[in-house]
Image (cartoon, grey):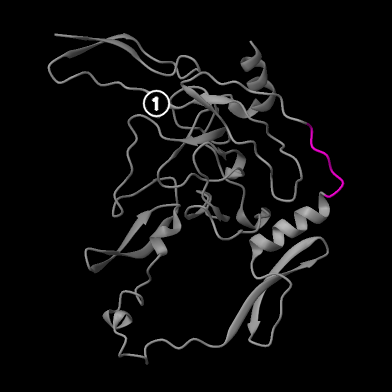
Amino acid sequence: MRLFLLLFVIFPCLMPAQSAYNCTACEKRKCQPLLSPCRGNRAIDPCGCCTHCAKQNGEFCGGADWEFGYCDRDYKCASVIGQGLVEIPMAGVCKSLPGYGRAEYFEDDDENCPKQNGCYRAMGHCDCITKHTCILDFFQYSALYCDPRFDDPSYDGLFEYPCTRSGCDIVDKECVCSSGGCDRTYEFSDGNKCYQALKERLCTNVTCPKPEALQCPPDSVAIVPHTPHGACCPTVPTSCTCNFEVCNNDCPKIKRKILVWKTDGVPGRCCDRFLCLL
């Protein structure tokens, strides 16, 4: 009952969508600043508007216009309760889902994402392709970087780098990042350091409510609480969600699997129950 009430209060948007979701126009949205370095890859939301650090295992994702972010390549934005993918504008959690493997680099990763052009280095050569993807590791090499001369130390005429310096300053309670000549000075070397300093200044006298202790069943994990950019305290607290990676659904090769009970994706009932018979 406690879990049901928690989800009812925290996730009012977890009701099934009645029609296909239409993104808000990019010019009407305010994107949060991209903080670097990211723990994983960078991502762009499927609406094609905002670039952010791809969300990792156990972090919130989805929401209206993907306000909670898009999951990194190894994970899917799944329903908090159940086994399916989240339906926008619902909020979900990034996790590994049974039946959803990682796409090869040359395959379309997500048909809901913008169509992108880019190159990969693979097996000593470059593949430049077009596909639907929100993960920006696709752009780790441009066509210029695929030029064989890029790896030739004797060729120094292909690339010229002007003397530039980048960094960030706190201006009117916001981090403003830019780049300039080598004589330009900045208070912080990157956006992440600037944001951390700004948060410390703004949250010095703020005391966040102490979260209630959460004990998840052995087949589940606690979701990372969500604190939006510019906030001092989490606005979406944690809850339990199934960790399907702990489930062992295989029988020895000499035995056949007889399913006894199919999981419904509820914490405490995350794994299938079955018999292995000769």
Residue type, mark 1 in image: Val
Residue 96 horizontal/vertical position (percent): 41, 35
**Looking at the rendering, which quadrant does residue 244 occupy?**
top left
Q: Is residue 233 left or right of residue 161?
A: right
**Looking at the rendering, which quadrant does residue 255 occupy?**
top left
Q: Tell me where the magenta segment starts and ends, as one range.
A: 204-209
Q: Relative to the observer, which residue lies in front, 272 or 104?
A: 272
Q: Is residue 200 left or right of residue 100?
A: right
State yes or no: residue 113 in magenta.
Answer: no
Residue 2 horizontal/vertical position (percent): 66, 14
Q: Residue at x 32, y 90 (%)?
A: 155
Considering only vertical position in the picture, is 206 above or below 34?
A: above
Residue 250 horizontal/vertical position (percent): 25, 21
Residue that numbered label 1 is attached to: 246
Q: What is the chief secondary structure element of the magenta stretch? A: loop
Q: Residue at x 82, y 53 (%)?
A: 202
